[in-house]
Image (cartoon, rainbow, N blue to C red):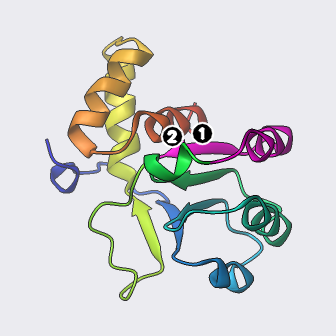
Amino acid sequence: MPLEKLTSKKKGPKMKIRVVSSKEEIETLDENEEIIHLAFRPSNTDIFSLVMKCPNVKALHIPSSYKRTISSSARMYLEMQGIDLLEGDVWGHRKDINEYSEVSRSVYDRIEEFRKEGLAEEEIIDKMVKETRLSPDFITFLMKQNS
């Protein structure tokens, strides 16, 4: 079932993901950003600057090809700060229309449905990856945030 076909029974907040297209944009971020998608290959300096600018950040979301190039020191720094490094893309997002990509409430509702059915976490992740095209990392993060 495609993401857009999921319907939500409950009203609630959507998770907003701030999409950042260049290192120059880091300085324009709001300090309260919690999840940031980096659409460029970040250096250690970029990651450090981003964390300094946004002290409440919980996760950095980056394409898999970029995640592989993140240095072990940057990974260790993020881990020490309690920041998850998530792999994935923001499919079909048009930054010229909105600087945020959103995860709708219906994604959380679907995870809850699977939990109520008694599915194991791995099964829920597999099903949600197929239904939403979100990465396993990101689904795991959503489940952890919503437990």
Which quarter of the image is occupied by the N terminus? top left
Question: What is the magenta range?
Answer: 70-87
Number of the label disc, if any, that sits on residue 145: 1
Relative to 28, is 138 above or below?
above
Residue 119 in sight from this viewpoint: yes
**Residue shown at the point (36%, 87%) measured from the top left:** 97
Instruction: Give the structural element (helix, strand or loop) at label 2.
Output: helix
Give left or right: position of 4 versus 90: left
Assess disc 1: are there few (<14), some (14-19) or many (≥20) residues with their C-alpha within 10 Å of its C-alpha.
few
> Disc 2 marks which residue?
142
Work out whether residue 78 or residue 74 is closer to the camera in this orientation and state it. Answer: 74
Dot 2 amino acid type = Leu
Residue 84: % across, % down? 66, 42
User: Is the Cβ of the residue at disc 1 closer than 8 Å to that at disc 2?
Assistant: yes
Give the percent coordinates (x, y) of residue 63: 45, 53
Q: Quadrant of residue 43?
A: bottom right
